[in-house]
Amino acid sequence: MKIDELKIYHVAMPLIDPWITSYGADYEIHSILINAISGDYDAWSETCALELPTYSYESANSIFYNISEIFGKKIIGNNYENSKNLNDDLQLYKGNPFAKAGLDIAWWNLKSEISNTPLHQLIGGTRKEVVAGADFGVEKDIDTLLSKIQLAVDKNTPRIKLKIKKGWDKEVLDAVKSAFPNSIFHVDCNGGYSIKDLDFFKSIDKHELAFIEQPLNSDDIIDHAKLSKLIETPICLDESINSVERAIQAIEIEACKYINIKPGRVGGITNSLEINKLAENSGIPVWVGGMLESALGAGVCIALATLENFTYPGDLFPSERFYNDDLSKPENKFNRSYIFEPLEKLPKPDSKLLRQYTVKSAKLN
């Protein structure tokens, strides 16, 4: 399959409410969309590391630059029989998994389009339904958080994820677990703590959380391995797993008992499949995460979650959760409460909204 042309768009999608985590607030989601063309076929992909280098060292601007000025020019016009060949060509360039993911996902979506095979089937997914959970960021006060959680509990959410940070943690957990003692919770620290906060982590063992997601620095696996042996609550790695090699190392030193797989963060679908295989062979369950992408990016995450080892409910949301008008159509919707069905065809950007939300664009041919 030869990629004849690439159209790259940096878009800013306004959120209904700001998304607040330990690294700050996002009022818009800055994402990179790629329209890949091969002969008479075309397909879209989406990769998103947010506007600023807060979640990772990549940002929307760095992704746009690397795809439009470097990575895209490396692969344009080349014939790739499989995605590994494409990834091998990009190995010359260090890091930047989000930028590489945009091109890897574009290859898979083109393959899906050309072969007329739904993406979830193409990657070996077997589930006909995908289970999602409820997620809550930092709120203005605990009462607001509790009222929002109540709505999710009333809809029978299978699990609840809480974003925590210093100053919004122990008191919040005490209140939440007191109000909802029978619900499954886990917390996401987004790397906002250090091994010096051991007493805090020990203090929340009593809450019997499903796990603690990314408690320590995004570049770390060593201290995570130490922490995992000092507390009872399992550790899940997110930001630290940004490549297949890092996953191998984390598994080897027993740094985690769960792995969150975001296709953008790990370099695309190809690496997601490999990390999932490594985790499954080691008895480590995985679950899919997202970056508040449009329905296009969410559709790829749903496809991944149809694989058997994705056993924990994913970070998957209906479009209305974050957007008044999702950039990509059809919008992402639950089939029923907290259940998605994988799509036969992935959503594509609405042309009017694409023009409205585009910050800048480029074309390679």
Image (cartoon, rainbow, N blue to C red):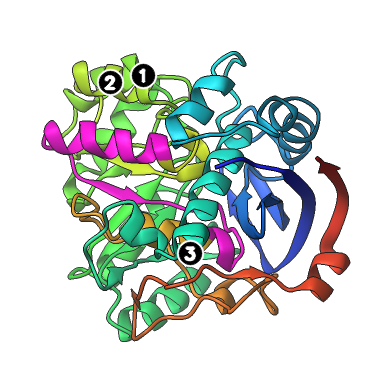
How far from the left and from the top, in percent, is residue 41? 63, 59
For marks 3 and 2, give the CA distance. 27 Å
* Residue 155 figure quarter: bottom left
Q: Secondary structure at mark 2?
A: helix
Q: How many neighbours does mark 2 have within 10 angstroms: few (below 14), some (14-19), or many (20 or more)?
A: some
Q: How many neighbours does mark 3 have within 10 angstroms: few (below 14), some (14-19), or many (20 or more)?
A: many
* Residue 320 figure quarter: bottom right
- Asked if 287 appears above or below 175 in the picture, the reply is above
What residue sits right under mark 2 in the picture? 248
- Asked if 182 appears above or below 101 in the picture, the reply is below
> Magenta span covers which residues?
270-297
Q: Are marks 2 and 1 in contact (CB under 8 Å)?
A: yes
Amino acid on which disc 3 is placed: Gly
- Asked if 107 appears above or below 227 in the picture, the reply is below
How far from the left and from the top, in percent, is residue 306? 28, 60
Query: Position of 305 compared to 309: left or right?
Result: right
> Which quarter of the figure is the C terminus placed in?
top right
How far from the left and from the top, in percent, is residue 3? 65, 42
What residue sits right under mark 1 in the picture? 245
Q: Are marks 1 and 3 in contact (CB under 8 Å)?
A: no
